[in-house]
Image: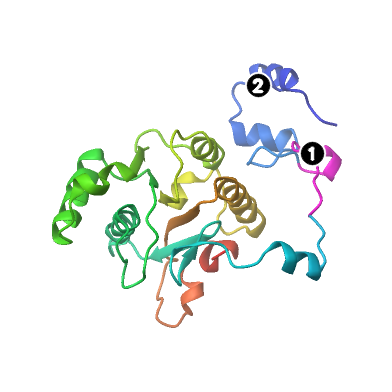
Amino acid sequence: MKLEEDELKILRSLLGRIDNSDLADLLGMDRFGGVVGTAADRAEPYKPPESWTLRELIHQYKDYRDPLVEGLLRRGEIMNLISAAKRGKTWLIMDLAISVASGNPWLGFPVRQGSVLVLDNELHPETISQRGKKIVEERQFQLDAFGDNIHYLIMRGCLRDVDLICQDIMNFRHPVSLIIIDALYRTYPAKTDENDNGTMAVLYNKLDRAILKLNAAMVLVHHASKGNQSTKFVTDVGAGAGPTPWRRS
């Protein structure tokens, strides 16, 4: 049975002492807002995958998606940047943002210039400012030539989960080519288990839909799993379930 929004409001008022995730469990909803059960019971109407013949695909899609970072990242793709803590992930991702905004190569990879949106939920604005200034000076770029191509949504102290972040992305006032989320784990809804394959697949599906609609690429900054990484394949270093460590859409 599908509960209407008014009914949900009444139940929430009656069950005020129960947090949102527990309420979701009681109502048979997953923690991303969807109703658990058959397709007919889901919060979103069921939409079957599109069916194509090989001939139709070859006729419709003449080439790959447009690259943003040549040989590394195309529009409509999600890339994970993963390492242990305090290894310079944020410095590296800020350098990528500056490279895309300015149209300069990144780590030797040619770049297509475009606007960048960074959703930062870890750093204070003062820290972002000083790090950005340092990178611009070290690379001897002219800030006035590209500085307005990088936009920050600073979320430290006002964290937002993946559903709200998708709304922020879709409603952002400027078209963007690259979206960076730093860090992924701080976008999880309350009580999310990042080791659950189904949960992480739902999260990535939401992000996939958003960037496909915007024709943008996305980079997620993520932490490595605990313990010795030296015996692992590079695709197994990231913490969490299957969709997270290895994913490049």
Dots 2, 1 in contact, CB < 8 A = no
Where is the C terminus found, in terms of image quarters? bottom right
- The location of residue 41, given as percent across then percent down, is 83, 38
Q: Does the image show residue 127? A: no
Q: Mark 2 belongs to which amino acid?
A: Arg
Q: Nearer the viewer, mark 2 or mark 1?
A: 1
Mark 1 is on which residue type? Pro
Q: Which residues fall within the magenta stretch?
A: 36-49
**x then y, percent, for residue 60:** 72, 61
Q: For the image shown, how many numbered marks are present on the structure?
A: 2
Q: Is 37 included in the stretch rendered in magenta?
A: yes
Quarter containing the N terminus: top right
Quickly name the residue at label 1.
45
What numbered label is drawn on residue 12? 2
Is 193 covered by the magenta stretch? no
Q: Residue 11 at x, y = what percent?
A: 70, 20
The residue drawn where x is 67% and y is 17% is: 14
Q: Is residue 144 above or below residue 22?
A: below
Residue at 31 percent across and 59 percent down: it is: 99
Relative to 218, is 241 above or below? below
- First in sequence, mark 2 or 1: give its number: 2
